[in-house]
Amino acid sequence: MSGERNDVSDWWTTSIIDMAPGQIRFRGNPIEDLIGTVSFPQMIWLMTRGDLPTPAQAKLLECALVAAVDHGPQAPSIAAARMAVTCGLSLNGAMASAVNMLDDVHGGAGEQAVELYHWIAASVREGTALEEASATMVDKWQAERTKFVPGFGHRFHKPEDPRAPRLLALVDEAAAQGTVGGEFAQIGRALQKLLNERKGKPVPMNIDGATAVIYAELGFAGPLARGLFCLSRSVGVIAHAWEQMNQGERNKGPTPPSYRWTYSGPNPIDPES
Amino acid sequence: MSGERNDVSDWWTTSIIDMAPGQIRFRGNPIEDLIGTVSFPQMIWLMTRGDLPTPAQAKLLECALVAAVDHGPQAPSIAAARMAVTCGLSLNGAMASAVNMLDDVHGGAGEQAVELYHWIAASVREGTALEEASATMVDKWQAERTKFVPGFGHRFHKPEDPRAPRLLALVDEAAAQGTVGGEFAQIGRALQKLLNERKGKPVPMNIDGATAVIYAELGFAGPLARGLFCLSRSVGVIAHAWEQMNQGERNKGPTPPSYRWTYSGPNPIDPES
Amino acid sequence: MSGERNDVSDWWTTSIIDMAPGQIRFRGNPIEDLIGTVSFPQMIWLMTRGDLPTPAQAKLLECALVAAVDHGPQAPSIAAARMAVTCGLSLNGAMASAVNMLDDVHGGAGEQAVELYHWIAASVREGTALEEASATMVDKWQAERTKFVPGFGHRFHKPEDPRAPRLLALVDEAAAQGTVGGEFAQIGRALQKLLNERKGKPVPMNIDGATAVIYAELGFAGPLARGLFCLSRSVGVIAHAWEQMNQGERNKGPTPPSYRWTYSGPNPIDPES
Amino acid sequence: MSGERNDVSDWWTTSIIDMAPGQIRFRGNPIEDLIGTVSFPQMIWLMTRGDLPTPAQAKLLECALVAAVDHGPQAPSIAAARMAVTCGLSLNGAMASAVNMLDDVHGGAGEQAVELYHWIAASVREGTALEEASATMVDKWQAERTKFVPGFGHRFHKPEDPRAPRLLALVDEAAAQGTVGGEFAQIGRALQKLLNERKGKPVPMNIDGATAVIYAELGFAGPLARGLFCLSRSVGVIAHAWEQMNQGERNKGPTPPSYRWTYSGPNPIDPES
């Protein structure tokens, strides 16, 4: 793939894919050796990380991908996808509309949780006790970033998000088998204990916090945790957009049309006029 | 989830997900029964179709998902994702930028191929010979839709796209085991033969044509074929956006800046001025 | 802007903009001659069409741009923009989310109306009476495209959309002054009469139908009518997204959280459990 | 617009638009009083700020909107728009693709410049000399945010961006007429002087820096400066997307296909194989 004008080719340099007519290699692996041989989670790992995971690693990644596919149409992302198809978009446009919304507030908690976990892990490696490291780093997070501790708290699932204990149990199993170290599961549990005590009530580990444990255990960088969350949630997006497509409707708004909105500005229309 | 104001709740009716505090069910299945039990491809099937596939069906779906993850940064979608992160977007925004571009021309061929295959299948079921049905339906497609026969032809991979024969071989295996009927693999091959003859040179079945065989064999509707292609390609998008993020750069344009563009309008700037 | 490697520069050929260090020309006009001299609507015309309009033409274009800025937060586009900022997106991301939804069904009626008007105009130019041409072309539209006649009908504004008569009156003024021909205003009114008669009740010309009259009178192609509608509506999008940003909220869903959605699938959660 | 179920209507409360059948009011103004009466820039101001500007204020705003419409197809946003239409998207999708890319790095400099100018203005109001305030606040910006001083520097336009002096001259005129105070033009010039001295060469005020002077003079908040930049640039986006649509092409990549990319990963394909 070289030539005289290397500057143009170099502008798009990548280590992910190589091609020649009739040949495709991903991270050095011929595509025909991968199809039918590796699982989709293994392929996801290969593409984003550069190496193939063991089956056990891929299995744990798969648990995180399965767990986060959907949380219903009240999530702005899913609502947007459903509205989008009624505006004339195809499934790709509906997916784009939804995934675009999975930004810092809606889809960024997993990425942030991986980062917070790593702060605590680094402190523990330097000799601080886990409990103290957790407290210190939560304080630091809230001082430097935001009062919202990523990965914990849910306005609906109380006292427990059903996904979190199941995912943590699977991390424990993987740790028992030597697939992962288990360090981040401990960190997650330490945070859970700390936050419950501080609030005086359950602050349940949510899907972002639980999948972040898995992503951190498996060595995924924070931004990839967000990317993989988006990939997982895209499954729900496709399902909802397709269901909406079959339900029909045109220009579906957020509420039934009869409700409209409350007007709070100057010179309102007199309903008697 | 009911109440007095059912019209508001009904506005967002779905058969995909049910929730209560501490409980989530997808298509009637508690989430904790799915995590760690079903594969990611099985979950994709469950969410989009409503039932769980057999492991053999899921395995064939997995082959299609693995095969389509990437085709390099010259694809406008991947280029857009890489440029997006240099503009300040996070991975979700990069994914949205890319998937939005997988519209009718760039990502719609799989959906269209499923539709064309079904036209041929319907004709065969009505008694027409496969060869004749293929020819007739290609003519109809070109008359009513576009001259581009979806799923065939590649400007780069000649004489063969390496993904197609591998995927068709896996469909054959699945057909031999009774997982699928094999009807659409026959249709794909009949189209291949027809187009080669008409063009007098290889018109290779491409990734859209090959995965459409699998999606049709497994009973996925055309729009879902596009959705699943977008899901698969999102893996490459994440990989490329993440690689670009690590390469750095700000406001990466399509070509090295020194090239700029050719101006073809009135009153050009005199380079001597 | 040339060089040895013209193929790379030619790949991005444009007649819109020329540049040299310290110099920018749009359609051949130095930027410093345009700033402070031409109005924003004149600039919009220059960029999209290549020539500068007369002040009177620009004034009529301006009316269309002013008229379509917003229709409230029940429109899926505006709702999406407001939800987007609560998910962490900046104003550009909110705008993108909204404009992406202005697709065929939500934002495409103006483009379609321009096309339908041109069908009728062509028929009239061939000698058919306006009334007959309108009836014939509406039939053709409904047979070949969709039952929805673009630019007419409103589920809320009955019996009249307040924007339409005002815009038509301004077209009449412009026609009286020789700025436009007035042909498309006649076509719009003929369609209005026809549809009212067919339905036996008012089918009010809406914002798409009225602005399409202006765009057609001024010679804008259909796709540009959609583009200009998106530009106009972007103003409302910015206003709403900014208002929402100031209202705060995180992950705003389509309805108050207490409503949730109606579940219509198998194995619902027993509310007593 | 009220009713028994105010919580649903209240969820979408806005002070921007009120409606009743046949009536639309923006910020309390009936739409029919605005169409044909106010200019597009006045309408933009009304929608985003809540009041109508004087003609002189609107005229200055118009200069900023005219100045920023385009900077050519090497900008990732414009390239994305052009690629998008070759992938099958309509103009709205092309606009969304482009505007989505105008994020912090690509389109956020104006917003940031407004903020930096306000830091300096606040310091001056507290009694610090302009020169010192500028130096201190640039240091603070680089320490707390990023080394990039927003609004200054250009990799192409040297020693001067032709848009900046023209826009500043128009601000001076407006200040002389009492339309604006002129404080932010002084700040902009102080920054220009400071940065030139520090770098020992021209660090030209760019389009973001110059329009930020106008937005700050007119009292627009930083995020609105970004929004208005996106609105202005959307004009160029429409022009380029429409030109590309007329040029044709399918799946236009960033470079001519013959260049492809440089592969830098393991196990490259042997070109001799």
Image: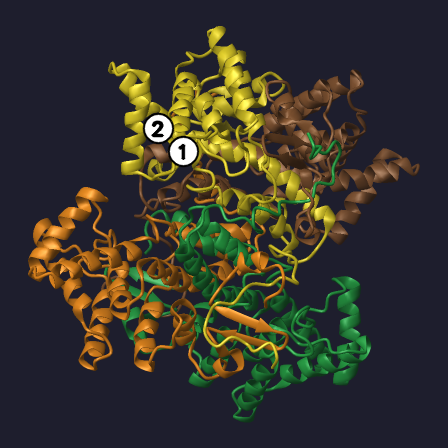
Chain colours: A green, B orange, C yellow, D brown
Task: Tell me the amino acid under the disc marked 2.
Answer: Leu
Query: Can the viewer see residue C219?
Result: no
Q: Going 46% across and 56% down the picture, which residue do you hit? A: A95
Q: Which residue is mark 2?
A: C116
Left or right: residue D108 versus residue A132 is left
Label 1 sits on residue: C150
Q: Amino acid at mark 1?
A: Pro
- Left/right placement of residue D176 relative to residue A10 reads right
- The relative height of residue C39 versus residue B226 in the rendered view (above or below) is above
Asked if residue B149 is positioned above or below residue A210 in the image, the reply reads above
Taking D253 as reference, is A240 above or below it? below
| Number of numbered markers | 2
Quick check: can you spot residue D4? Answer: yes
Of label 1 and label 2, which has the lower sequence position? 2
A145 lies left or right of B270: right
Question: Residue at (73%, 20%) from the top-left corner?
Answer: D54
The answer for which chain carries disc 2 is C
Residue B271 locus on image (x, y percent): 46, 24
Q: Position of residue D105 (x, y in %)?
A: 60, 47
Callout 1 touching callout 2 (CB < 8 Å): yes
Q: Which residue occupies 34% across, 52% down?
A: D260
Quadrant of the drawing holding the C terminus of chain C: bottom right
